[in-house]
Amino acid sequence: MKAKSGTILIAVLLVSLLAGACGAPAPPPPEPTTPPAATTPPEATTPPEPPPAPETSIVIAIGGDPSTMDPQYADDGNERDVNDNVYEMLLHRDPASGDIVPGLATAWEEIDDTTWRFTLREGVDFHNGEPLNADAIVYSVERIIDPDFNSEQITFVATVTGAEAVDEHTVDVFTSGPDPLLPARMTWMKIVAPVYTEENPDDFLVAPVGTGPYKFVEWVRGDHVTLEANEDYWGGVPSIGKVTIRPIPEEATRLAALQAGEVDLVKGLIPEYLDQAPKAVAASGLEFPWIRINTNTAPLTDVRVRQALNYAIDKEALAEALYGGYAAVAQGQILTPGHFGYNPSVTAYPYDPQMAMDLLEEAGATGATLELVGESGRWLKDKELVEAVAAQLEAVGLDIDVNIAEWSDWLDLLFAGAEAAPDLQYSAHDNVLLDADRTLTGMFTTGGSQAAYGNPTVDQLVEDARTETDVAAREAMYYEAVQTLYDEAACIFLLNLDNIYGMSENLDWAPRLDGRIMVNEMTLVE
C-alpha cells in the first residue's frame, strides 16, 4: 500500500482515527444439596461432604495466535499470554509491588562474582509427572543460551553462561561477570521439562508442559487455546477451572464479543470503547511503540535524515488522536522513569516539520523512497499508528511504501538481522526486567537480536554496565548510552502506552505493571 501525502490527509487521518467502531453472566449457582439426615445421638453425626465447587470458566481475547508454544524461543506476546499460565520461573514478581519474590526457587544468594545459588521448592512436579529438580533448571538454562538454538529471548539472559546442580534441590547459575540483574533475569526464563522436551520435540512446540497453575488441553490454530486448572499446583488450586484464549485481531470484533458475553477479558481495548464495555480498567504500562531504522542503508546512514524522521512526527497528536490520552510521548528513549538507566535529562524530539524538511534537503534526501513494514492486531492500534506515521513522513517530503505483513512474517523479519532489515520497521517493546540492559542490548548494540544499528561506544557502555556493581557508575554508563542513541536518532521514538482492558461484570482482576495475564490472580463474582 502506498501512503498518501499532504497535510490535509494528516488532519483527516488523525481526526478519523478518533471515531470508534460500533457481560458475560455469572455462572449458575450449584444445585442445592440436601444434607443427609442426622443420626442419633447427635454426637455421632458425620458432617456431610461439602458440595463440589461450581464449574467456572472464562474466555480471554488477545490480538493474535501464538507463533509457537515453546516458552524459550519466540519473543512473542501472544505466546506469553498462554504460557505465563502454564510455565513458571525460578523467581516471580509480586503483582502489585513488582518486587521479586520466590517462585520455583524459595531462596537465592550470590555465592561469588559469577555464581548465584538457588534453593528449589520441594514436592513440585511438571504436569506430566516429571519432577522439578536441579537437573531441570540446568537443562532449561543450557537450552535457552545455546547459540545453535538461537533464542529470540537471549537478551533476557545475556550474562548467563551455564548452570550446575549442587544437589537435587540446589542449583548454581553462572554469569560472565558480576550481574546484579541476575535475579530479575530469573523472573523471565521459564523452566521446561527435560524428558518431555527431548523425547517429544514436535509435541513440545504445540502442547506445553510446565509446573504452573494451568495445564494445557488443546490448541486449535487460529481459533482458541484451552487450559484447565492444575489441581496439584503448589500455590493452591486456581478459582477459575477452565480458560479459553481466543485470537481476535480486530478491535471492534473483540468489543462485540465482550458485549455479547462471548468473552470475559479483552486485552488491548481501544480508548473509544471504554464506555461501551461492561467494565474497563486502564493501568500504566511498559509498552513502547517505536520504529526501527536500518542505519546501514542510504539515505538512513546520514544522521540528519534519521533526525528528520523524528522531527517529522507529531507525537502529542498521535497520543491524543489515536489513544485518547492513554499514552505518553516517549522522552527520547524506550524506557520509563521506573527503569534503571532512564535518563531524565533526555527529552522528546519536538514536532518541527520545517526542521525535518531542512535536514532532508541538506542531506539530499528529499523525495527519497523508504519502506515501512508494520503488522496489524498484535498491539493497540498498531496498523493505524503505522499509517499515521507514514502520512506525517510523507508530509515532509518523503515517499513511504507501507507494507502490512502477516504476524509470522513480521516476527521473522524483526529477528532476521540487520542485513535483512527493511528501511523502517514498526514494533512495540516492553521491558519487564525494569533495567536498561535488556532494551539497549537487544535493540541498539551491534548484532543485537532486534538491532539494525551499531556504535562501538554504545556497545562498550552497555557491555561494561552489564557487570558493573557500583550502582552510580552503572547508571552513568546507561545515561551516556541513552544520550548517544538520542543524538544519533537511532530509531524513531514514539509513545509509551497504557494497558487498557475490557472485562465482563463478574470478572474481578487488577492488571499488573508487567502486563502479564495471570488467570490464577482472577476471580469470578456474583
Image (spheres, rainbow, N blue to C red):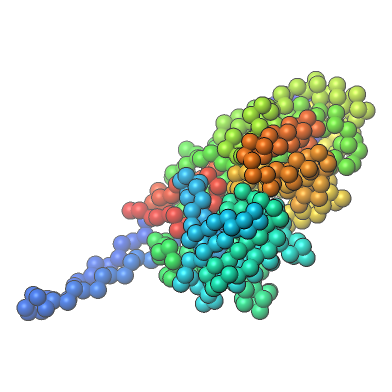
Q: Quadrant of residue 437?
A: top right
Side (left or right) of 57 relative to 219:
left
Nearer the observer, 23 or 449:
449
Q: Position of residue 80 (x, y in %)?
A: 60, 57
Residue lying at 77% horizontally and 62% vertically, measured from the top left: 147
Residue 243 in view here: no
Residue lying at 50% horizontally and 40% vertically, measured from the top left: 282
Side (left or right) of 56 relative to 461:
left
Quarter of the picture holding the N terminus: top right
Residue lying at 69% horizontally and 37% vertically, measured from the top left: 478
Q: Quadrant of residue 319?
A: top right
Nearer the observer, 270 or 291:
291
Side (left or right) of 221 relative to 373:
left
Q: Position of residue 219 (x, y in %)?
A: 59, 67
Q: Can you name the residue that lies furthest to the right here?
A: 364
Residue 105 in view here: yes
Residue lying at 81% horizontally and 47% vertically, measured from the top left: 446
Q: Can you name the residue that lies furthest to the front here?
A: 112
Q: Position of residue 193 (x, y in %)?
A: 59, 72
Q: Quadrant of residue 300?
A: top right
* 22 in relation to 143, above or below: above
